[in-house]
Image (spheres, rainbow, N blue to C red):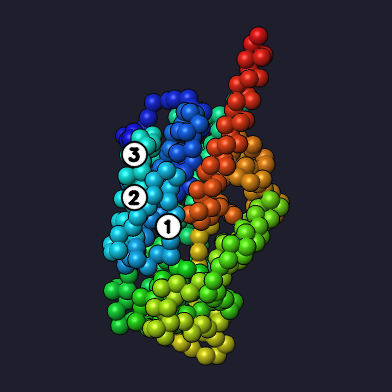
Amino acid sequence: MIRARGGVVPAVDTDVVVIGAGQAGLSAAYWLRRRGLSFVVLDAASGAGGAWQHRSPSLSVAALHRIFDLPGYPFTPPSSGSAASVVSSYFRSYEALYALPVVRPFRVESVLRLSSGFQVGPYTASGVINATGTWTAPYVPFYPGSFAGRQLHYADYRGPEEFAGQRVLVVGGGASAIHVLAELPSAHWVTRSEPVFHSDFTEEYGREVVAQVAARVSAGLPPRSVVSVTGLGWTDLARAAQARGNLERHPMFDRLVPGGAMWGSRFEPFDAIVWATGFRAALSHLAPLHLREPGGGIRMEGTRVVREPRLHLVGYGPSASTVGANRAGRAAVHELAGLLRTDDAFREFAVC
């Protein structure tokens, strides 16, 4: 493994730069190694694990619905331990097993366009695979009013102990909200729309969901989260939240006040608010490439950005899941490898 010292590394040319060392980035790195392409993986975190290393220590590995294997290395989770430590250890072992050239901590501030490819910090590359995920871009919606108590996003949630004896308002209708509701002794749950729980997700339904998300990104619209399309599953966490009496959903409040929230003229007091309102894709470093379409999103075909054929987004839109990230990593490398081979052949012909 290569370690950056103060974020400074020697200038180097490579076939592909991978940005991010989570599930999608490591999957892409595996397939790049299989294809024999030169590459480097730039990761902003100080250690292995992607977003998992930042998850609440209260989230146990036993409570996870499923973590899909990284390619070429089965994941056999223990029966106990925090998801953060267990999954991070798995990623760390994976990097070591395949001797992946991960540079960390290295925060990519910008990706610049060159005539022959891209400039990413000191690296020049013919192609870029972006796998930065969403964890570093938590989203908190605006609501009128102000609240005097503690507010935090789910990204900063570290377990129920810090809310002992408090009345907590949990906002959001996704899996992160269910995690919080499963742990707090008592909570008031609000969502914008009525949550839908499914007892079984069929393969056909899964394909339909992915197709819906893919249709948005292919039209240049911002992707919706997969869970916003699928609804919620009856996981162990959902059942735990139900057992605590925390799955009684209430409509969104109208405004915040210093001591709580208002629904019309009705006041409810709260000591804290947990915004389990999701994340946005962390893509600010791609802004110099001007990829946004009039609809606000980045138009893609598969994993490829239409405006930049040598730039691929994995773990984004329809591939924003562990199994989807694996497949996207392989697809991105397959397409990039074909494009780079074509470019090499053209250059050789031009020289002759």
Q: Quadrant of residue 201?
A: bottom right
Q: Amino acid at mark 1?
A: Ile
Label disc, if present, on residue 97 of the rendered structure: 3
Give the class, few, some or many, for how many residues have Cα within 10 Å of label 3's Cα (few <14, many ≥20): few
Place of residue 256 in the rendered image (x, y in percent of width and height, measured from the top left): 50, 78
Residue shown at the point (35%, 75%) measured from the top left: 183
Q: Is residue 48 above or below residue 197?
A: above
What secondary structure is found at the residue carrying circle 2? Answer: helix
From the image, tell me which residue sits under label 1. 67
Name the element at disc 1: loop
Left or right of 202? Residue 293 is right
Query: Where, by quadrant of the figure, is residue 185 drawn?
Result: bottom left
Instruction: Kindly tell me whether residue 249 is visible in this rendering.
Output: yes
Q: Nearer the viewer, residue 258 or 305?
A: 305
How far apart, in angstroms, are the residues tagged by discs 3 and 1? Answer: 19 Å
Marked residue nearer the N-terminal end (3 or 1): 1
Which percent across, then down, holds residue 309? 64, 36
Secondary structure under tag 3 reads helix
